Amino acid sequence: MTEVDEAHTDESIRAAMQLIDRGLGDISDRSIVATSEVADLLLDVRSLLSRLDAEVHAN
């Protein structure tokens, strides 16, 4: 991988981690979390990782 690809990979990983952190922060104060909220968070993370995977395999 080139430096540009590594930088983009790092950026994508950070974006996924930030998304997870925000989601966990939103639900950490509640004792009950809707299944749909967890599913939305997982789908958002999967979407970010899918784009990253496609970019890595395209190069």
Image (cartoon, rainbow, N blue to C red):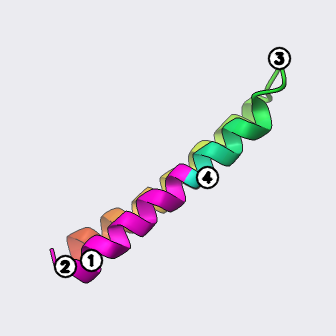
The stretch of residues the image draws in magenta is 1-17
- Do residues under tags 3 and 2 come within 8 Å of each other at their CB atoms? no
The residue shown at (73%, 30%) is 35
Query: Which residue corresponds to mark 2?
Result: 59
- Do residues under tags 1 and 2 come within 8 Å of each other at their CB atoms? yes
Q: Considering the numbered disc 2 on the image, is that residue within a helix, a strand or a loop?
A: loop
Crowd rating for badge 2 (residues with CA inside 10 Å; few <14, some 14–19, many 20+): few
In terms of image quadrants, where is residue 31? top right
Q: Considering the numbered disc 4 on the image, is that residue within a helix, a strand or a loop?
A: helix
Query: Which residue corresponds to mark 1?
Result: 5
Query: Which residue corresponds to mark 4?
Result: 19
Name the N-terminal-most of marks 3 and 1: 1
List the single residue furthest toward the left.
1
Residue 11 lies in the magenta-colored region? yes
Q: Main secondary structure of the magenta part?
A: helix
The residue shown at (49%, 52%) is 46
Q: Considering the numbered disc 3 on the image, is that residue within a helix, a strand or a loop?
A: loop
